[in-house]
Amino acid sequence: MAEKWDGSYDSNRRSYDSSRHSDESYHEKLHIEPLYESFVCPLTKQVMRDPVSIENGQTFEREAIEKWFKECRCSGQRPVCPLTLKELSNTDLNPSIALRHTIEEWTKRNEASQLDNACRSLGPGASESNTLQAMDYVVNICNKSWTNKHAVRKAELIPLISNMLKSSSRKVRCKALHTLYIAVEDNDDNKQVMAAEDTVRTIVKFLLHDHSQEREEALSLLYELSKSESLCESISGVNGAILILVGLSSSESENVLIVEKAEKTLENLEKNEKNVRQMAENGRLRPLLTLLLKGSPETQLSMVEFLGELVLSNDVKVFVAETAGSALVDIMNCGSKQAREAALKALNQISSHEASAKILIQAGILPPLVKDLFTVGINQLPMRLKEVSATVLANIVASGACFESTPLDQGQQTLVSEDIVHNLLHLISNTGPAIQCQLLQVLVGLTSSSRTVLKIVSAIKSSGATISLIQFIEAPQRDIRMASIKLLHNLSPYMVQELSDALLGTAGQLGCLIRVISENNGITEEQAAATGLLAELAERYSGLTGRLLAEEAFPIIYSKVMKIREGGIRGGRFVTPYFEGLVRVLSRLTFLMENETGIIGLAQEENLAALFIDLLQPNGMDIVQMVSAMALENLSKQSKHLTKVPESLDPGLCASVFSCFSKEPVVTGLCQVHHGRCSIKESFCLLEGNGVEKLVACLDHNNEKVVEASLAALCTLLEDGVDIEQGVLVLCEAEGIKPILVVLLENRTDLLRQRAVWAVERILRTEDIAYEISADQNVGTALVEAFRHGDYRTRQIAEHALKHVDKLPNFSAIFPKVGADL
């Protein structure tokens, strides 16, 4: 042990001697009293605070010599002097009172002088090295005792150090932040001095600096300041301070220490309710929700009210619903009117996201909502709150949850029960526009689901509310009109005749729909719904088509279709349903062409056949291709009536004299199928404009509906009244025979089989093709299956087809028909 202490002493002594010379030069430079060797403990090499002497007169720091004697005893040796290593007879310690007083006086004079010099070194014009040394000194004396922090404040060093935060030197700024932290640590008086000097704002700015050390030092200092409740308001009063802290606390790129310090700082700031509100505005909702759940009744109400004013992100809505959803529903059930109003506004915010709305349903939000809406009399909510209730209900329904199995009361009624829907319809008819709009949105949500739409349709029919719902199409409020059109669009597939009759029997609504469709403000959801509604109406309802003609709807719709195809109207997420609806409405004209010269003339004028052929091209819109093929079927059926057959020339006198003049003159340029002059525009002939080729290409479509419609259109080339043999030839030249046979073989749907069998039977009437096809056993098998399993008409046609390929005997060739000779 002696050697150890010798070595330590020698080494420390050398260090002390070398540092002493350095300190003396520094002291001389700053006019500070020199450090006397007698003031320094030989063991600690530090200025003594409680000097004591031992038996041989050597002086040490009390704590150090006591530790020395203890180690001697523990090692089993008799106590010796640390300096002389001579054995001592006792370990008595005698206080060196005079030396202690001298040291204390020296320390006070020295510290006062050094504080004075530090002030000068922190002033204008001081060198960087002197400034850093001065701050080092402040750190050292503050670490020595709490009273020194008082001396630093008295010397007015805190404002001087704060000024160093504006230095151009990063070293000085970092040292200043650290020095201030040491100076204010656990010292509220020093913290108040910093607050008075408006240093807090400067510290907050450091949180945005790129240099990590500056951010760390600033955050440590800010955390220390936040321990003082009075300073919490000063911190939050700096614009953006809480936002920056919230960002740092949730950052995934910052180091762990910064994240932890930011989190602890925010936890200190949470003691102030005003700060809690600021945090909530910046996405940190947990403190607010904690007060909402555990605060005093007044605080809870205040937090609920504030929650209703916030604009929340979707993730936060889910968090709030999970944390406080049940509490808010409880307030709805049994809170005061003021509390219920606040809860409703908060729920309005939270329910506007699908995931959070579903959480609220699980929390039981539906029963109190419906009760608030339907309650009348003394206990009813004011209309302004019923409006909020209706909005929340609309949000909840828009989530797409399972409402048919969510009970509203003990009677197991649900939101889609007939009585509930009747009440909703009654409210729609007897409330103001704001509530009407929201309740219409409720019905829109319920009819958007295949699980609930039929129940709503049934309730609307039983209540006789169709006419009243249609009348909202003319509402002056755009949002009501839009909700009404969306609702009617959802209902239209299930109420085709009812809505067709209602629109035909009322004035103005049909024209309003057309005006909505014709608006030139991009493509909106309302326009898509309006075209969808018109598209679903009974397509063969001549009265309705006549009204559309009277409203000049078809030229408008044709113009919109062309503009979209030419890029004249910008697309968006509603362009596809809007375009599909336009094409479907336009195709209505082709379903009512029999003896309707006006409609035929309009179709010719707009060259609809060319448009529908063009729309057959692959575009990702199956409905457009299907509807176009259906329209072409209707148009093609008119070709045999519209083709211009040339009049036969009268042979006259020449024919009676010269026999050669009795022959029919040869007329060129005639349609081989219709035997007249055809064009795509005037007679809608499919042979023009590559119509046949494009329809044949559609036979390979994945969508059976597109294939059905395309095959039906091609079959118009094989029907009675046209040259069937030439029709088959046209299909053969367009390479359409094989695809039709493939449709037959695939047997995808009953309707496809019926049409394919019909087409194949017509094709097999051409002997050469029949001979070639008869070699394909698969075709024969498919016809046999159709003969065995098809309906009566299909079996008859399959029977004829099988005769063409000699699968069945042709008895008509053996037994002449009765009356054949007549």
Image (tube, grey):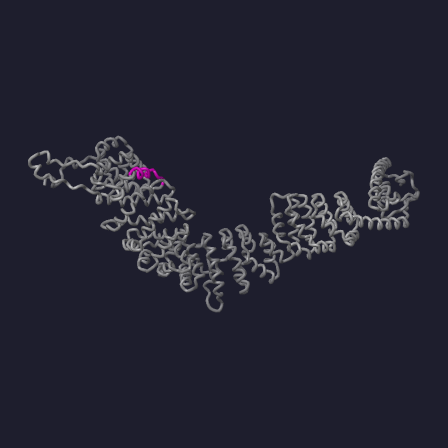
> Between 606 and 599, which is closer to the camera in this rendering?
606
Q: Quadrant location of the C terminus?
A: top left
713 relative position to 271: left or right: left
Does 527 sit above or below residue 24?
A: below
Q: Residue furthest front?
A: 125
411 is within the stretch colored magenta: no
> Between 722 and 768, which is closer to the camera in this rendering?
722
Q: Can residue 441 be seen in this view?
A: yes
Magenta residue span: 692-702
Which secondary structure type mostly characterizes the magenta part of the structure?
A: helix
What residue is drawn where x is 91% and y is 38%? 84
Q: Residue furthest bottom?
A: 378
Give coordinates of residue 721: x percent, y percent: 20, 42
Q: Quadrant of residue 661?
A: top left
Q: Quadrant location of the N terminus?
A: top right
Q: In which quarter of the image is residue 34?
A: top right
700 is within the stretch colored magenta: yes
698 relative position to 717: left or right: right
710 relative position to 40: left or right: left
Q: Is residue 4 visible?
A: no
> Between 20 and 331, which is closer to the camera in this rendering?
20
Give coordinates of residue 93: x percent, y percent: 90, 47
> Between 295 and 234, which is closer to the camera in this rendering?
234
Q: Residue furthest left?
A: 657
Give coordinates of residue 551: x percent, y percent: 31, 55
Give coordinates of residue 234: x percent, y percent: 67, 56
